[in-house]
């Protein structure tokens, strides 16, 4: 499927700081894309360039195959990192105003605001000033602001930060629904468990460049294999010295081992059995968090 949104070789510097270093990525219709990377890796910069609030130094942003225009950008739902609601304006008035700015007729805007505030659980706060809401509820209003004008694309900068678990569920459902209507969604997050659970595809960015991207399954399958071993009577370090095996710590009393591609898991099993009973012995793929650490530290070692 052809990408709807494409960043092609996009670069951006702030003085000596390279914020984006020839970044390329594409989003297909209805795709939920998780954008992860350390603080300062360039996620917000990339999103601002998509929105046109910041100009790139090189490269191109394309929408449906053509260089993105101001009119296309009108149809983007954006949640900026710095948020940007007017604190003294009432929730409802503000949302209607923002919907009108994006071209909705008054009746349409009022209807969309009623629907989205209801869906996001802030309908009762519609006549309150934004500043009187808790931060999490302000964030729900911010998401409503991104959605009220029926966007063709959602670009959300850390939409999950600071949300309670129920609000995380509401946000996740809303994003999934947007995708099921064909709207591509790109969002940044440091909550990698959530990204792993939610996203169709993930991109890991480091120092302005994509160091890994693919579906969570692809990334996990390409990572180093792990063994989880429960050997209750083993002394610490029981697996030390086994060829191609690195101990990665313990989880719920089990030893987690990482295997190089040529490592022999049967040797590990023999070593485990030599310690006493083996209650559990299973292979698994690394989590996104582990892959992320791997991708970032590998690059640092290579630098
Ligand atoms: N207005 C600016 N002036 C100078 N440098 C900037 C500016 N905005 C961003 N930078 C720098 O550009 C780089 C990328 O920053 P950016 O905010 O895009 O990262 P990020 O991945 O969104 O980080 P975080 O996860 O902390 O939000 C960083 O080194 C940052 O310090």
Image (tube, rainbow, N blue to C red):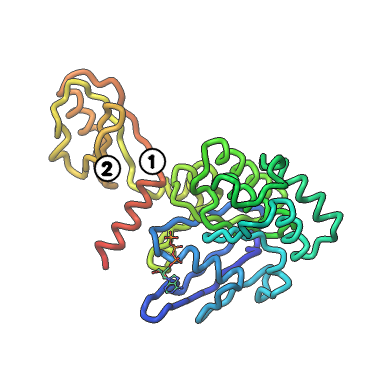
Whole-percent x, y for residue 201 in the image: 53, 52
Q: Residues within 10 Å of mark 2 (few under 14, many from 20)?
A: many
User: Which image quarter: residue 153?
Assistant: bottom right
Label 2, secondary structure: give it.
strand
Which residue is at a point 59% across and 43% down the rendered structure image?
A: 172
Left or right of 176 in this view: 47 = left
- Residue 232 sits above or below residue 178 on the image: above
Which residue is at a point 49% across and 43% down the rendered structure image?
A: 194
Which residue is at a point 80% across and 55% down the rendered structure image?
A: 109
User: Which image quarter: residue 75?
Assistant: bottom right
Split into quadrants, the picture shows ligand 1 in the one at bottom left
- Residue 266 sits above or below residue 47 on the image: above
Left or right of 98 in this view: 296 = left
Name the residue carrying label 2: 259
Residue 285 shows which numbered tag? 1
Question: Residue farthest to the top?
Answer: 277
């Amino acid at each position: 499927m052809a990408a709807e949104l494409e960043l092609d070789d996009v670069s951006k510097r702030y003085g000596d700081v390279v914020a984006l270093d020839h970044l390329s990525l594409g989003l297909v219709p209805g795709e939920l894309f998780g954008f992860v990377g350390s603080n300062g890796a360039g996620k917000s910069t990339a999103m601002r360039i998509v929105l046109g609030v910041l100009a790139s130094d090189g490269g191109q942003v394309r929408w449906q195959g053509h260089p993105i225009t101001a009119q296309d950008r009108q149809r983007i739902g954006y949640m900026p990192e710095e948020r940007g609601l007017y604190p003294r304006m009432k929730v409802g008035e503000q949302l209607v105003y923002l919907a009108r700015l994006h071209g909705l007729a008054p009746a349409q805007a009022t209807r969309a605001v009623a629907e989205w505030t209801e869906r996001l659980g802030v309908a009762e706060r519609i006549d309150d000033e934004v500043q009187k809401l808790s931060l999490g509820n302000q964030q729900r209003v911010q998401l409503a602001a991104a959605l009220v004008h029926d966007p063709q694309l959602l670009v959300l900068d850390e939409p999950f930060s600071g949300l309670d678990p129920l609000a995380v569920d509401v946000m996740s459902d809303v994003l999934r629904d947007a995708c099921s209507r064909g709207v591509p969604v790109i969002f940044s997050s440091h909550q990698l468990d959530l990204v792993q659970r939610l996203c169709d595809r993930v991109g890991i960015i480091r120092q302005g460049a994509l160091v890994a991207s693919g579906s969570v399954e692809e990334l996990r399958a390409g990572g180093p294999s792990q063994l989880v071993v429960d050997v209750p009577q083993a002394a610490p370090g029981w697996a030390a010295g086994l060829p191609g095996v690195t101990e990665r710590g313990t989880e719920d009393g089990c030893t987690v081992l990482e295997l190089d591609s040529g490592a022999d898991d049967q040797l590990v099993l023999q070593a485990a059995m030599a310690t006493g009973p083996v209650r559990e012995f299973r292979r698994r793929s690394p989590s996104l968090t582990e892959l992320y650490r791997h991708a970032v530290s590998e690059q640092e070692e290579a630098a």
